[in-house]
Image (cartoon, rainbow, N blue to C red):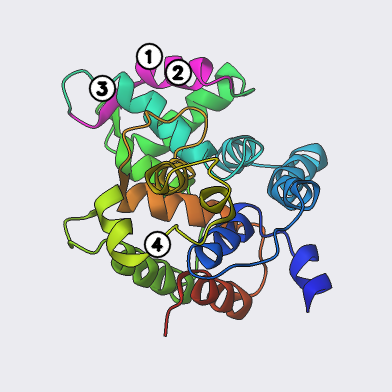
């Protein structure tokens, strides 16, 4: 079982399993090298898809985002939202092109034009940013979506649609975490670090995780896992779901 667990490509989900379990009981720590190898699996699979070629522009953009890890798609969404000065959640072709380039995705001008035209279905000259990001997210079965929603609902203790430090404190205690026991980090620091997992290096560090961020994160993790059943079992194990 352990060998199978380490070979599937769970990326950051394993890190979260270890974190959540260590917040409830004392566990033997996994080595950093093992975690880094598993975290690389998602990026490696996306890189292999890109190397194989033959991808349409949307699939290529998705794979390029996933080479940055599970927060890649969220990072692109944040880049777009930073340009949405009027809060319309819509981008014209110039803004869309600028956002893609600023995020550093290696997509040609022609491919960007194809993407924009395919989403500008009414020919209005703008695309709905939210709808675009939903289609960019790796497709998932209803079974996977349901267990992600179940996990979010458990974490969002107040039911306000956002996971905060206060929510986590109502669900988990970090006092059994090795870094708390060693005095390296406070309980708040450990829980806040967990929240930042969903934002990645380009996050705003606001200490809040929206349902969109949570779902995008696990949609990316899901892309490296073939079995619906295995995904469901591991999510339930990570979040102690029924």
- Residue 160 occupies quadrant: bottom left
Give me the C-alpha separation between circle 4 and circle 2.
44 Å
User: Which comes sooner in the sequence, label 4 or label 3?
Assistant: 3
Q: Residue at label 1? A: 94
Within 10 angstroms of label 1, few (less than 14), some, or many (20 or more) residues? Answer: few
Q: Residue at x 61, y 55 (%)?
A: 15
User: Real-space Cα distance between discs 2 and 3?
Assistant: 13 Å
> Which portion, as a residue range, is magenta?
88-104
Mark linked to residue 54: none
Labels 1 and 2 touching (C-beta < 8 A): yes
Give the crowd class for mark 3: few <14, some 14-19, many >=20 residues within 10 Å.
some
Which of the numbered marks, if any, corresponds to residue 173?
4
Determine which residue is flagged by label 2: 97
The alpha-carbon separation of the residues under discs 4 and 3 comes to: 38 Å
* 4 vs 3, front mark: 4
Q: Earlier in the sequence, mark 1 or mark 3?
A: 3
What is the spatial separation of the Cα atoms under label 1 and label 3, in whole angstroms?
A: 12 Å
Taking the spot 70% from the left edge, 43% from the top edge, the residue there is 43
């Amino acid at each position: 079982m352990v060998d199978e667990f380490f070979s599937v490509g769970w990326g950051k989900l394993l890190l979260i399993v270890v974190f959540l379990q260590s917040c409830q009981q004392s566990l033997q720590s996994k080595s950093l090298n093992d975690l880094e190898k598993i975290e690389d699996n998602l990026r490696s699979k996306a890189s292999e898809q890109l190397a194989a070629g033959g991808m349409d522009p949307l699939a290529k953009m998705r794979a390029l985002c996933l080479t940055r890890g599970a927060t890649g798609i969220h990072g692109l969404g944040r880049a777009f939202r930073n340009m949405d000065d009027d809060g319309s959640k819509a981008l014209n072709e110039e803004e869309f092109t600028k956002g893609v380039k600023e995020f550093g995705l290696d997509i040609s001008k022609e491919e960007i034009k194809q993407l924009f035209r395919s989403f500008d279905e009414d020919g209005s000259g703008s695309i709905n940013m939210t709808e675009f990001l939903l289609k960019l997210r790796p497709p998932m079965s209803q079974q996977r979506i349901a267990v992600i929603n179940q996990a979010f609902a458990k974490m969002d203790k107040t039911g306000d649609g956002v996971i905060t430090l206060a929510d986590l404190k109502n669900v988990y205690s970090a006092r059994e975490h090795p870094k708390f026991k060693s005095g390296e980090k406070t309980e708040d620091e450990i829980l806040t670090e967990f929240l930042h997992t969903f934002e990645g290096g380009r996050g705003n560090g606001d200490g809040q995780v929206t349902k969109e961020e949570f779902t995008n994160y696990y949609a990316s993790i899901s892309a490296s896992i073939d079995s619906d059943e295995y995904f469901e079992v591991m999510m339930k194990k990570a979040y102690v779901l029924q």
